Amino acid sequence: MIQRIEKVNISKKFDLFEEYWKPRIVGELDESYVELVKLKGEFVWHHHEKEDEMFLVVKGELLMKLRDKDIIVKEGEFIIIPKGVEHLPVAKDEVHIMLFEPKSTVNTGNVQNEKTVQGQWT
Amino acid sequence: MIQRIEKVNISKKFDLFEEYWKPRIVGELDESYVELVKLKGEFVWHHHEKEDEMFLVVKGELLMKLRDKDIIVKEGEFIIIPKGVEHLPVAKDEVHIMLFEPKSTVNTGNVQNEKTVQGQWT
């Protein structure tokens, strides 16, 4: 893909889609994608074999459940889930997230179910 | 480095340092660092041979000069500078930036001068 150099307005990109749990790619750096995703409800316990994953909360409040503790991540905060660590993202109310992860990452990691989707450019 | 899983509050991290143009590492994902940096004034024309670099504006307004155009990047916006592209970040007033870049990145790229620094954990 040819990359033109343009700035990206995060809020305007979020206005372009409504669906939950379907990441939209908004940038690429070397072998990683920058993605935006809207979350609502509970995802699925999973881990990523090979990829670290960063969740930056742009709006709302994310509950990140780990096997040994729960972490609440608020607007303006981020959390990095290292490879191999089981996690369950939960959004009681709608949450807007910016994700950073290698291009190889599958959203549901080691699990394959109806929530498994490929990121798509928006 | 052993990575404990903790959330990071971006604003609180910015409160921990004052210096301009000295990136602080606040996270790592695979082969990339997440860094925070305060900018004020004009940097130096440079490019990175091997690394794409992402500038996310957390506070203020960044002028990113390229050889063929100027781009103003505001709070809540980001820009990705692909490898090989000459750029000059300018901050008329103080700007707070979150950077994503490979660990190998040197802040001044192909240029070595008094602004050349290594990122450090904060």
Image (tube, coloured by chain):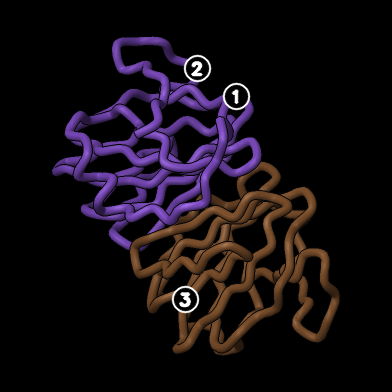
Chain colours: A purple, B brown
For disc 1, the chain is A
User: Secondary structure under badge 1?
Assistant: loop
Cβ atoms at labels 1 and 3 below 8 Å apart: no
- Image position of B42 (left or right of A93): right
Are dots 2 and 3 on a single chain? no
Examine the rendering and report whether any part of residue A98 can be seen.
yes
**Residue A97, x across and y down, in percent:** 33, 46
Residue corresponding to mark 1? A49
Q: Are marks 2 and 1 in contact (CB under 8 Å)?
A: yes
Amino acid residing under circle 3: His
Q: Residue B79's mark?
A: none
**Residue drawn at point x = 58 percent, y = 74 percent:** B89
Mark 3, Cα crowd under 10 Å, few <14 / some 14-19 / many 20+, is many
**Residue type, numbered disc 1:** Glu
Q: Position of residue B61 (x, y in %)?
A: 40, 76
Marks 2 and 1, how far apart in space?
A: 7 Å
Q: Left or right: where does residue B20 sit relative to residue A71?
A: right
- Asked whether B72 or B37 is in front, the reply is B72
- Residues behind callouts 2 and 1 on a single chain: yes
Residue toward you, A10 or A73? A10
Mark 2 belongs to chain: A
Task: Looking at the image, tell me whether mark 2 or mark 1 is earlier in sequence order.
Answer: 1
Q: Can residue A81 be seen from the camera position used here?
A: no
The subunit letter for the residue under badge 3 reads: B
Q: Which residue is mark 3?
A: B96
- A84 is higher (above) or lower (below) than A32: above
Mark 2 or mark 3: which is in front?
A: 3
Label disc, if present, on residue A110 of the rendered structure? 2
Residue visible at 77% across and 76% down in the picture = B117
